[in-house]
Amino acid sequence: MTTPPLDRDDPLDDFDHRDIILLGLKHRVYTTGSGPAVIVMTEMPGISPHVARFARWVRDAGFTVYMPHIFGKDGAVPRAPRMLFTMIGGCISRQFRAFQANESSPATKWLRALAAQAHRECGGRGVGAIGMCFTGNFALSMMLEPAVLAPVLAQPSLPLNDAAGMHIAPDELAAVKARMEAEDLTVLAYRFEGDKYCQAARFAAYEDALGDRFIGRVLPDSAANPDSPMKNPHSVVTIHLIDEAGQPTVAARDEILDFFKMRLSE
């Protein structure tokens, strides 16, 4: 795979795009690949070249990527002041409830509907889903959709004001746990040890709630790309990934791809 330069806006011209209307709401969705569907949910501030690179890795592993526009300018390198405006908008949006613990983002309802449609279109055993940062916990709420079999939480950062908070309503969490136990499912989660946006207390809360159904991976801060413009070690599979053999972030990426293959392949 030839990756477009990560320091330039990505035209996303190897993705198809269409506007999908579900539950009365329309979102642009970028798709590429073939095979079982995987929903790739962007981190803040949007579908950056690094997020698109990860989506291509998923595609090249044998999946159909569905990458919905959630916020920001699609394909753009994060730049101020647009990045700041996008982050502020996300924080105050009623679709995300960024400061609410024990509540689920309303945005996950549309994403669950997208997962159901993707399963109908692509077939296979089910659908994978990965959320990152602002969307990091969305993949867990999406398990209320029976088609979602392989959820991945990459540095789940909400709620922003409660390090030990879980961004999912208690009744939904209980339903997800019951389903995971009934169907012998697990959720993968990743964070850097010193990440100030996704701290150890959050993983501890998920472990207390889900037991051994929650598989949390904590990477050392030394594994984060030191050349990233963001000095806080945070984005495991995007801006802080070091794309070299033997790197812990590459091992995390490969584990995620293997998880999708194990759960979704016939």
Image: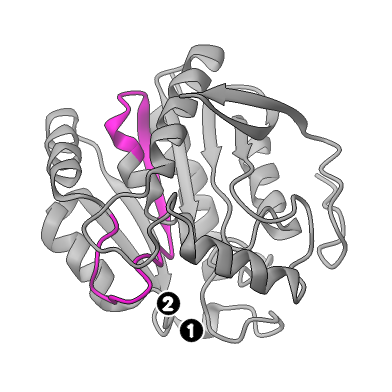
Query: Could you tell whether 74 is left or right of 11 in the image?
Result: left
Say what amino acid the circle numbered 1 marks: Asp
On-image quarter of the C terminus: top left
Number of other residues with Cα within 10 Å of mark 1, as a class: few under 14, some 14 to 19, many 20 or more: some
Front: mark 1 or 2: 2
**Residue at horizontal 62%, vertical 52%?**
71
Choose the circle earlier in sequence order: 1 or 2. 2
Residue 246 visible, this orientation: no
Residue 203 visible, this orientation: yes
Q: Reply above or below: 88 against 212.
A: below
Say what amino acid the circle numbered 2 marks: Tyr
Query: Could you tell whether 265 is left or right of 43 in the image?
Result: left
Q: Reply above or below: 112 against 233.
A: above
Per the image, label 2 sits on a secondary structure element best described as loop
Q: Are marks 1 and 2 in contact (CB under 8 Å)?
A: no
**Residue at horizontal 29%, vertical 63%?**
100
Residue 70 screen position, x and y as percent: 59, 47
**Residue at horizontal 20%, vertical 39%?**
176
Instruction: Residue 232: name its quadrant.
Output: bottom right
Q: Reply above or below: 105 against 80.
A: above
Of residue 83 and residue 223, the one placed in the foreground of this image is 83
Instruction: Residue 144: name its quadrant.
Output: top left
Secondary structure mostly seen in magenta is loop
Question: Disc 1 and disc 2: Cα gap in Å?
Answer: 13 Å
Instruction: Tell me the magenta residue range.
Output: 142-167
Of residue 262 and residue 149, the one placed in the foreground of this image is 149
Residue annotated with mark 1: 221
Residue annotated with mark 2: 197
Q: Is-magenta flag for residue 146?
A: yes
Query: Could you tell whether 153 is left or right of 187 in the image?
Result: right
